[in-house]
Image (tube, grey):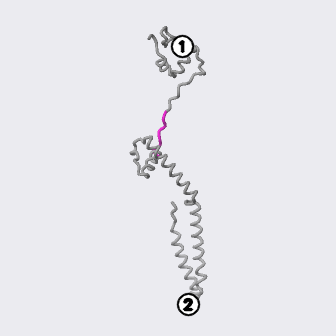
């Protein structure tokens, strides 16, 4: 064989064998007597007869962006939460590990969404507002309590009602001040 086969020429020019067969059938390749392809002459002929606007450009070489360390550690944390092997710190996360973490997170998200739809989860802002409202109502009840019971207690003890109310208010306010330090943790 004097020249190249269709497969060899296809590899030489970076086209498919089918494209070479079409070019051969259309007479855009130079052939030797034995039917093999004269590569140098065919390259020149193709360059002269091919419309550059209709050729495929070579694909741009993609440069991979570095993965932020936060993303890698998030993958590791997700895998550890599920009891799976996490990548070593500073070591590369494999595609399989990242894919597994992604699938785990999607499953967790779907579980949370389903629990929310079932009414098993509540909104944190709403819960915080509810706790605040209940605490305020309880505080208001305690603030008004000395005025309601001072006269009854004063009569039972035989003391001045105004003095009893003043003493009760002082101690109730002190207790309420202590309770303001308690903060609910709704995490």
Marking on residue 29: 1
Rendered position, 17 above or below 154: above
Q: Position of residue 24 (x, y in %)?
A: 54, 15
Can residue 104 be seen in the rendering of this structure? yes
Can residue 38 be seen in the rendering of this structure? no
Quadrant of the rendering where the N terminus is positioned: top left
Rendered position, 109 above or below 59: below
Residue at coordinates 48% horizontally, 35% vertically from top-left? Answer: 64
Label 1 crowding class (10 Å Cα cut-off): few <14, some 14-19, many 20+?
many
Kind of element beneath mark 2: helix
Q: Position of residue 83 (x, y in %)?
A: 41, 51
Question: Which residues make up the magenta segment?
Answer: 63-70
Residue hosting label 2: 156
Of the numbered discs 2 and 1, the one sitting upstream in the chain is: 1
Q: Nearer the viewer, mark 2 or mark 1?
A: 1
Residue at coordinates 56% horizontally, 91% vertically from top-left? Answer: 158
Kind of element beneath mark 1: loop
Residue 148 is left or right of residue 14, and the answer is: right
Q: Position of residue 13 (x, y in %)?
A: 50, 19
Q: Nearer the viewer, residue 123 or 141?
A: 123
Q: Are marks 2 and 1 in contact (CB under 8 Å)?
A: no
Label 2 crowding class (10 Å Cα cut-off): few <14, some 14-19, many 20+?
few
- Look at the image and say whether residue 68 sits in the magenta stretch: yes
Residue 79 is left or right of residue 141, and the answer is: left
Q: Nearer the viewer, residue 139 or 51?
A: 51
Rendered position, 53 above or below 156: above
């Amino acid at each position: 064989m004097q020249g190249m086969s269709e497969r060899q020429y296809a590899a030489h020019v970076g086209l498919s064998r089918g494209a070479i067969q079409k070019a051969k059938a259309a007479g855009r390749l130079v052939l030797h007597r034995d039917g093999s392809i004269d590569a140098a002459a065919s390259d020149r002929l193709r360059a002269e007869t091919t419309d550059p606007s209709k050729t495929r450009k070579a694909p741009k070489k993609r440069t991979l962006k570095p993965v932020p360390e936060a993303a890698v550690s998030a993958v590791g944390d997700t895998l550890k939460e599920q009891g799976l092997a996490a990548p070593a710190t500073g070591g590369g996360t494999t595609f399989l590990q990242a894919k597994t973490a992604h699938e785990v997170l999607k499953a967790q998200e779907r579980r949370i969404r389903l629990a929310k739809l079932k009414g098993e989860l509540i909104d944190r802002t709403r819960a915080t507002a509810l706790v605040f409202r209940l605490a305020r109502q309880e505080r208001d009840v305690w603030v008004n309590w000395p005025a309601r019971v001072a006269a009854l207690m004063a009569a039972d003890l035989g003391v001045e009602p105004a003095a009893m109310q003043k003493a009760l208010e002082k101690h109730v306010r002190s207790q309420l001040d202590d309770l303001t330090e308690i903060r609910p943790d709704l995490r």
